[in-house]
Image: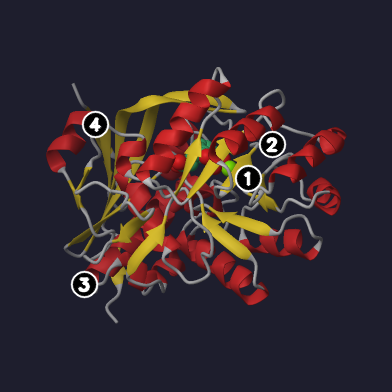
């Protein structure tokens, strides 16, 4: 198998306005500040996406901390390196603690390049299948229940395979009841993004009445012990998102009964290799796993869909269509939802869709080029 030398990494910072506001228990989002990593390896290129938030609200990382870490600590450890497999990158930057989203931006780009070098779809390189995967959609917190029901109704009409409602104290049981009253027995779950504490157990137990698929990350991001105490009191399965930073943390969480479902996010886990380890763990234990999203552009979206094609992804992910968030995606064609609630796993090499150079240029704010042993050369777009 040919090796791959990391000759150059471009960090492309793009500004993309979402079609509407997206509110969670930790903040409201309208404009995305996204860094794309483009790696150059012996004639092939690959694209990855930084999934850090503009502010460190979902996790400790932000766009700025990730850029700092990439420039100062991660890129110097991998530029010029020759690897037999994308998973070998981990060994080169293992000494750098955390900063998983920063690592994943480059690691996923190398997976794309590696798959392209073999003429294989990324899904196949990861061990997944061709075909289609069911797609769910995440619905933000609204100002009133009527507006939320309108949005849920539109997504159901489009065919989404499950609906996820963001909740927080004051926007939970009544909202879920409203959705059940309006739409009946649809596949429904909620995501609290760490907004509750164990003091809320009695309140959260009221959600058990609504037959939810799961409640995602009700308690603190750095906790699994309280989640185990909560799960013991809830019939609704607990799913962990923020708390699962590696396959090892998932193993501990499952061992103590902190959750019954696991959310995999490529960025939060530090890349596809760790996501594969988590997939193996969940599969071997028969634990339901699904692929989360981070309001990605088409590039991150395609990485998620490739991952979600693996057999251990047993529930619909937040792998929604490009048009869920973007008027115009930077990939061509965009990701589209079929009426049966599925999105296609691309059959072309790598992430499988073209990155539109003209659209990328139109949204680029700054670009910097990193090569082995040299100071980066950068430019800011006008
Ligand atoms: O908790 O899953 C989450 C978006 C940003 C940060 C965290 C989360 C989310 C979402 C939306 O729920 C997922 C998506 O549609 O990309
Ligand atoms: Mg979540």
Q: CA–CA distance between discs 2 and 1?
A: 8 Å
Looking at the picture, how far across and down is residue 333, in whole percent? Answer: 19, 49
- Kindly tell me whether mark 1's CB lies below 8 Å from ligand 2: yes
Q: Which mark sits nearer the N-terminus, 3 or 1?
A: 3
Q: Are marks 2 and 1 in contact (CB under 8 Å)?
A: yes
Q: Which mark sits nearer the N-terminus, 2 or 4?
A: 2
Quarter occupied by residue 345:
bottom left
Looking at the picture, how far across and down is residue 221, in whole percent? Answer: 69, 41
Which of discs 3 and 4 lies nearer the camera? The answer is: 3
Q: Which residue is mark 2?
A: 194
Q: Please tell me whether residue 237 is drawn above or below residue 329 in the rendered image.
A: below
Secondary structure of the residue carrying tag 3 is loop
Q: Quadrant of ligand 2?
A: top right
Looking at the picture, how far across and down is residue 250, in whole percent? Answer: 67, 60
Q: Please tell me whether residue 202 is drawn above or below residue 264 in the rendered image.
A: above
* Mark 1 surroundings: few (<14), some (14-19) or many (≥20) residues within 10 A: many
Q: Which residue is mark 4?
A: 364
Secondary structure of the residue carrying tag 2 is loop
Secondary structure of the residue carrying tag 1 is loop
Q: Which mark is residue 56?
A: none
Residue furthest top in the image: 143
Secondary structure of the residue carrying tag 4 is strand
Q: Which mark is residue 119?
A: 3
Q: CA–CA distance between discs 4 and 1?
A: 29 Å
Q: Which residue is mark 1?
A: 242
Q: Which mark sits nearer the N-terminus, 3 or 4?
A: 3
Q: Are marks 4 and 1 in contact (CB under 8 Å)?
A: no
Q: Which mark sits nearer the N-terminus, 3 or 2?
A: 3
The residue positioned 39% from the left and 24% from the top of the image is 20
């Amino acid at each position: 198998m040919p090796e791959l030398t990391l000759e150059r990494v471009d960090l492309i910072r793009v500004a993309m306005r979402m079609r509407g506001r997206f509110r969670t228990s930790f903040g409201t989002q309208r404009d995305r500040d996204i860094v794309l990593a483009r790696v150059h390896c012996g004639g092939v290129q690959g694209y990855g996406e930084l999934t850090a938030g503009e502010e460190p609200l979902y996790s400790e990382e932000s766009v700025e901390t990730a850029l700092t870490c990439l420039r100062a600590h991660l890129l110097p450890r991998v530029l010029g390196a020759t690897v037999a497999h994308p998973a070998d990158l981990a060994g080169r930057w293992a000494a750098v603690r955390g900063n998983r989203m920063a690592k994943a931006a480059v690691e996923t780009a190398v997976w794309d390049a590696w798959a392209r070098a073999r003429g294989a779809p990324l899904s196949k390189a990861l061990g997944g299948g061709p075909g289609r995967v069911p797609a769910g959609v995440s619905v933000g917190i609204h100002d009133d229940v009527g507006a939320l029901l309108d949005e849920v109704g539109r997504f159901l009409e489009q065919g989404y395979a499950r609906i996820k409602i963001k909740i927080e104290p004051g926007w939970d049981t009544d909202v879920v009841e409203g959705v059940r009253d309006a739409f009946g027995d649809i596949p429904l779950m909620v995501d609290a993004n760490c907004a509750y504490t164990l003091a809320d157990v009695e309140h959260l137990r009221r959600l058990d009445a609504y037959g939810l698929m799961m409640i995602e990350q009700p308690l603190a991001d750095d906790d699994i012990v309280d989640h185990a105490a909560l799960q013991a009191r809830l019939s609704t399965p607990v799913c962990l998102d923020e708390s699962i930073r590696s396959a090892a943390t998932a193993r501990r969480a499952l061992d103590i009964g902190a959750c019954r479902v696991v959310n995999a996010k490529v960025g939060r886990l530090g890349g596809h290799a760790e996501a594969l380890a988590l997939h193996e763990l969940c599969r071997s234990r028969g634990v339901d796993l699904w692929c989360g999203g981070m309001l990605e552009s088409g590039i991150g979206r395609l990485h998620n869909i490739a991952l979600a094609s693996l057999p251990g992804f047993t529930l619909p992910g937040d792998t929604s269509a490009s048009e869920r968030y973007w008027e115009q995606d930077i990939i061509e064609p965009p990701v589209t939802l079929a009426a049966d609630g599925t999105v296609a796993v691309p059959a072309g090499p790598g992430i499988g869709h073209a990155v539109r150079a003209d659209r990328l240029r139109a949204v680029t704010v700054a670009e910097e080029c990193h090569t082995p042993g040299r100071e980066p050369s950068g430019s800011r777009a006008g």
